[in-house]
Amino acid sequence: MTRRSSQTVRRRRLGAELRRLRESRGISAEDVIRHMDWSASKLSRIETGRIAVLWEAVAALLDFYGIKDGEEREALIRLAREAKQVGWWQPYSDFLSKDYRTYIDLETAASEANIFQPLGVPGLLQTPDYARAVISDAGALDLDDEAIERRVNLRMERQQVLDGDHPLKLWAILDEAALRREIGGRETMKGQLRRLAEVARRPGVTLQVIPFEAGVHASLTSTFGIFRFAEEDEPDVAYIESFAGTLYLERLSEIQAANLTFDHLRATAKSAADSLRLIRAIAEQYG
């Protein structure tokens, strides 16, 4: 399954035209970033058609670029209106934080993701029962059964990025604690461990485990990841999760630090084959 549509084509046409206009007037990306108060990543995604942009923002850009021609302005603003795509997650928007919406947009658009999670199984790899247990026990939330199921459904829909014509290339590293922490009871953990063993054999998915005997490693408590995108000129985005929310990192130095940390974790973890054997061994303990 793929979420691409004719709106993707419109976004790319609009982005290419906005970039052409900017460059033809000798305006740098840095000038636009300062004027619009955007990040470098946002401008790049607009100009490569990875995200939609409000028509009001297009109008402001055209003003900045000195585009006065009525027909040209009208055509680009109309294209912006047509390209404005409602996110697939829109039915769940009533409970999605801004941070979570950003995360889902990045996850949906990315071609590759490197993820480290020390204390639990990443959402992309969770079974419905495991996800339900995690969501039900979230201390800050007081949810009825319907609200819990909607959150579980959203998490399962996110997993579609691992399927289809252009699946996300995923490299996930877990701490052994994530495999041994019993969440949702024995049957839930048995199903979750079997799910990990199944996903680990998929093309495009690499799963590694840092064993307890590795001791101290490069990221004992921080969940973080790095998203990469198919377009060569589209910068990577890293993130760090905490109780206060998700911090998104876009500076080159920050991305380099995240990549270096992930490389250290890769070197510390068991190989993919040995990790799979460990997952199966723990799963066998559940019968």
Image: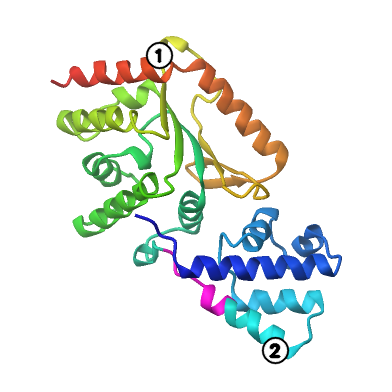
Name which residue lies at 38% across and 37% down: 122
Mark 1: which secondary structure?
A: helix
Q: Is residue 13 visible?
A: yes
Residue 257 location (% of width, % of height): 66, 31
Q: Quadrant of the C terminus?
A: top left
Q: Quadrant of residue 49?
A: bottom right
Q: Residue furthest front?
A: 165
15 displayed left or right of 82:
right
**Mark 2 or mark 1: which comes first in sequence?**
2
Select label 2 or label 1 by which is in front: 2
Q: How far across and down, in percent of the image, does residue 43 sit?
A: 68, 60
For residue 43, above or below residue 7 = above
The label on residue 212 is 1
Distance between the alpha carbons at the discs numbered 2 and 1: 65 Å
Other residues around mark 1 within 10 Å, as few (<14) / some (14–19) / many (≥20): few
Question: Mark 2 sits on what residue?
Answer: 71
Q: Quadrant of residue 117?
A: top left
| Position in image of residue 261 (x %, y %) | 59, 26
Q: Quadrant of residue 36?
A: bottom right
42 and 228: which is toward the camera:
228
Q: Position of residue 66 (x, y in %)?
A: 82, 79
Stretch of the chain drawn in magenta: 80-87
Q: Residue at position x 56%, y 28% from top? A: 262
